[in-house]
Image (tube, helix red, strand yellow):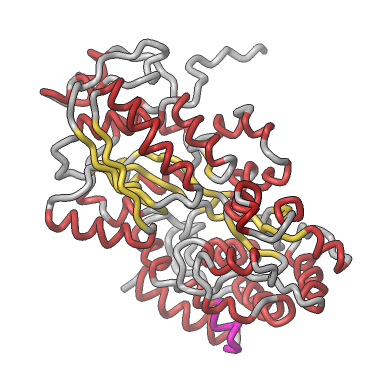
């Protein structure tokens, strides 16, 4: 049977009248015109709220061209099309929670927070209900890991925006020199790592208290051996055969293949080590490659041509990735909600999101599968395919349980990272798992 043609196939396209949008959102006054979005309505751009200002607090992009795009072309176009002045403030990603806490408690601060991971869950009481906006932006089409980050107890406390994937960046020349093949499994990675460390080029990935790289290293390793912090019903399940196997592998891999200093690394340490040519491979976003490609004067000669990428290795229970999700959340206290909605709809409009993704050249992923089909991916270096394929393996912290405040608390306390770090330092896997179990029960059952 011939399948019916699905209408509105564009990632964020739909057709709805301005009147219906206004009725459904319940926005009044100056914000009425803000209920209509650019491109969101299938070609005809209804009127925006003329005037107003929106203050967005976001992370400082690793690909600085994205910050320049926001402050430059996007700010100009938003002012022209919606009459909205954009104040786009960027800070270190690790500092956003402190700013959000202070703002929610005082009732004043940025209109929009660009949250990471599932921070909308932590600040849900201070963020608006975004359900109507999510419906009109077809958030239901987004990746599950994106939706789970923004949806709190059935209510969207923000709009999923974009995400950052990760893969293993490696030196092709070092692997060739060691006679090592690109690994598909953890065992193959261990075999390659042993050879590389013998040559003086160990693997390097952080086991420190960092918001990005450390959890991206540890959680997928745990899952790939069948371990999990909680089961589907949210019951602590860390004390398992799979977790012990993952810990035992970590100990062997750390001793035989890794740079021992990784216990103290932060999210930039592996980048520096890679550029210093002291490691052969590391789990990272695409920033290492793009620095080498776009700023060759800052790295060893010809480095970009020597970099390859591969997905996280498979374990007995498969291959996994955690992907850093970003959500735009409008604060309840904001007096500029019309302008805030204008900004969110503006950046989610297809042509604007496409510019945002293209300027980062594969470092950032779109919120739903349609963005992975965009032609620009075919124009990027083939080595970036691992990042393109990330969403196929994406899971959130707390898997296989819900991605809720408790899962976020476990992440914030680095319980899973410390589980592996203790083993790397020499604690027995059994004792380290027992300690993690106690810590997890304090969170989930306390």
- In the rendered image, residue 147, in percent from the top left (x then y), is placed at 42, 42
Q: Residue at image x 53%, y 63%?
A: 213
Residue 424 as seen in the image, left or right of residue 339: right
- Given residues 157 and 376, the one toward you in this image is 376
Quadrant location of the N terminus in the rendered image: top right
Q: Horizontal placement of 314 versus 320: left or right? A: right
Q: Examine the structure image and report whether residue 424 is included in the region drawn in magenta.
A: yes
Residue 77 rendering spot, x and y as whole percentages: 35, 25
Q: Is 102 rendered above or below residue 438?
A: above
Camera-nearest residue between 380 and 134: 380
Q: Which residue is drawn at 41% across and 12% down?
A: 43
Nearer to us in this view, 29 or 172: 172
Q: Position of residue 426 (x, y in %)?
A: 60, 89
Chain part drawn in magenta = 420-427
The answer to which quarter of the image holds residue 2 is: top right
Q: In which quarter of the image is the C terminus?
A: bottom left
Q: Is residue 415 left or right of residue 371?
A: left
Residue sitting at x 49%, y 61% = 212
Q: Picture coordinates of residue 144 (x, y %)?
A: 48, 43
Q: In this view, does 406 lie above or below 368?
A: below
Q: Is residue 157 visible?
A: no
Q: Residue at x 30, y 47 (%)?
A: 89
**Residue 46 found in image quarter:** top left
User: Looking at this view, is 164 or 369 the one in front?
Assistant: 164
Q: Is residue 405 visible?
A: yes
* Quarter of the image where one finds residue 187: bottom right
């Amino acid at each position: 049977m011939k399948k019916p043609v699905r209408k509105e196939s564009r990632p964020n396209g739909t057709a709805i009248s301005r009147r219906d949008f206004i009725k459904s959102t319940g926005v009044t006054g100056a914000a009425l015109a803000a209920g209509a979005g650019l491109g969101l309505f299938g070609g005809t751009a209804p009127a925006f709220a003329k005037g107003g200002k929106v203050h967005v607090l976001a992370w400082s992009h690793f690909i600085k061209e994205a910050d320049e795009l926001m402050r430059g072309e996007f700010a100009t176009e938003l002012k022209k099309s919606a009459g909205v002045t954009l104040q786009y403030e960027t800070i270190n990603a690790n500092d956003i929670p402190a700013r959000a806490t202070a703002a929610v408690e005082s009732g004043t601060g940025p209109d929009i927070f660009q949250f990471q991971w599932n921070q909308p869950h932590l600040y849900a009481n201070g963020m608006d209900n975004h359900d109507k906006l999510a419906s009109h932006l077809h958030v239901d089409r987004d990746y599950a890991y994106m939706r789970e980050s923004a949806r709190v107890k059935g209510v969207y406390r923000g709009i999923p925006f974009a995400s950052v994937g990760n893969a293993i960046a490696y030196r092709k020349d070092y692997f060739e020199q060691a006679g090592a093949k690109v690994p598909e499994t953890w065992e193959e990675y261990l075999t390659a790592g042993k050879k590389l460390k013998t040559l003086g080029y160990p693997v390097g990935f952080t086991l420190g208290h960092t918001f990005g790289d450390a959890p991206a290293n540890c959680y997928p390793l745990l899952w790939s051996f069948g371990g999990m912090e909680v089961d589907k019903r949210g019951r602590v399940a860390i004390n398992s055969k799979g977790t012990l196997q993952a810990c035992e592998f970590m100990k062997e891999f750390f001793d035989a293949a890794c740079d021992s200093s990784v216990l103290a690394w932060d999210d930039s340490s592996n980048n520096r080590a890679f550029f210093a040519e002291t490691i052969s491979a590391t789990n990272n976003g695409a920033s290492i490659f793009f620095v080498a490609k776009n700023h060759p004067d800052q790295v060893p000669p010809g480095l970009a041509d020597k970099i390859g990428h591969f997905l996280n290795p498979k374990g007995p229970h498969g291959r996994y990735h955690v992907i850093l999700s970003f959500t735009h959340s409008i604060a309840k206290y904001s007096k500029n909600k019309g302008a805030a909605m204008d900004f969110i709809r503006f950046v989610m409009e297809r042509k604007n999101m496409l510019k945002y993704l293209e300027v980062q050249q594969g470092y950032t992923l779109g919120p739903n599968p349609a963005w992975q089909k965009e032609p620009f991916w075919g124009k990027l270096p083939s080595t970036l395919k691992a990042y393109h394929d990330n969403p196929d393996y994406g899971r959130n912290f707390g898997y296989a349980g819900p991605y809720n405040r408790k899962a976020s608390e476990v992440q914030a306390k680095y319980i899973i990272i410390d589980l592996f770090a203790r083993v790397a330092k020499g604690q027995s896997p059994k004792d380290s798992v027992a300690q993690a179990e106690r810590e997890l029960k304090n969170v989930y059952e306390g």
